[in-house]
Image (cartoon, rainbow, N blue to C red):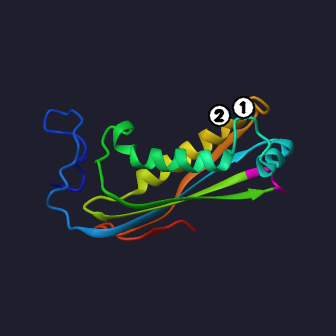
C-alpha cells in the first residue's frame, strides 16, 4: 500500500476498518488528558463530597473506565481490543478552579490504545459535568489531548 493512500477507505472510496491481522503484537500504552473548569464553589463541593448526586470523582472514574472499555462501540473505525488496564486519576487545582483528568491505558496487541485513553478522559469530564450541572452550568471542558503513546510500528510519541 502506498503511503499517500488513506488507510480507512476501501477501493470503492467508502469507509472500512483497517486490517491489523498482519501487525506485530506489542505492548502499547497511551496517556490522555482533559480538564474541566468550574466555579470555585463547585470544586469545593466536589472536594467536600457535598454534591447531591454523590461522590463525583468516584462516579467519574467509573464512567471513564466504562468508556475506555466501550470505545470500539462509539468510534466507528476503532477495533475492539483487549485492554490490560485503564487508570483514571484526578488533580483538584483550586488555584485555577479546575479538575485535571489523566488516563493511562495499556494493552498487548496489534493496535494502540490512544482512542481508548482519549475517550475515557472525555467521558470522565462529561461525567463531572453531569454530576454538577445542577449547581454550575458554566463548567467548561477543555484540552482533551494525547500526552503519550508507546508501542507499535509508529513508535513513541510524547507531547512537549
The answer to the question of whether label 1 and label 2 lie on touching residues, with beta carbons closer than 8 A, is yes
In this rendering, is residue 103 above or below 75? below
Alpha-carbon neighbours of circle 2 within 10 Å: few (<14), some, or many (≥20)? some
Q: Nearer the viewer, residue 59 or 107?
A: 59
Residue at image mark 1: 133
Residue 131 position by quadrant: top right
Residue 8: give x, y in percent of width and height: 25, 43
> Which region shows up in magenta?
94-98
- Quadrant of the drawing holding the N terminus: bottom left
Circle 2 residue: 130
Is 40 placed left or right of 69 in the picture? right
18, 137: nearer the viewer: 137
Displayed quadrant of residue 26: bottom left
Q: Could you classify mark 1 by the number of other residues whose Cα lies within 10 Å: few (under 14), some (14-19), or many (20 or more)? A: few
Quadrant of the image containing the C terminus: bottom right
**Which residue is pictured at 60% across the width and 39% down the height?**
126
Q: Is residue 105 above or below residue 98?
A: below
How far, Cα to Cα, is label 1 from label 2?
A: 5 Å
Amino acid at each position: 500500500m502506498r503511503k499517500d493512500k488513506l488507510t480507512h477507505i476501501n477501493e470503492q472510496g467508502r469507509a472500512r476498518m483497517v486490517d491489523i491481522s498482519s501487525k506485530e503484537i506489542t505492548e502499547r500504552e497511551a496517556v490522555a488528558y482533559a480538564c474541566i473548569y468550574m466555579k470555585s464553589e463547585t470544586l469545593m463541593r466536589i472536594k467536600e463530597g457535598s454534591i447531591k448526586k454523590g461522590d463525583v470523582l468516584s462516579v467519574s472514574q467509573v464512567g471513564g473506565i466504562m468508556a475506555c472499555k466501550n470505545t470500539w462501540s462509539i468510534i466507528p473505525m476503532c477495533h475492539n481490543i483487549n485492554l490490560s488496564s485503564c487508570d483514571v486519576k484526578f488533580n483538584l487545582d483550586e488555584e485555577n478552579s479546575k479538575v485535571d483528568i489523566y488516563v493511562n491505558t495499556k494493552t498487548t496487541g496489534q493496535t494502540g490504545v490512544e482512542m481508548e485513553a482519549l475517550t475515557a478522559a472525555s467521558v470522565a469530564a462529561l461525567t463531572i459535568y453531569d454530576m454538577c450541572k445542577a449547581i454550575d452550568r458554566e463548567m467548561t471542558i477543555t484540552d482533551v489531548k494525547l500526552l503519550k503513546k508507546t508501542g507499535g510500528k509508529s513508535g513513541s510519541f510524547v507531547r512537549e
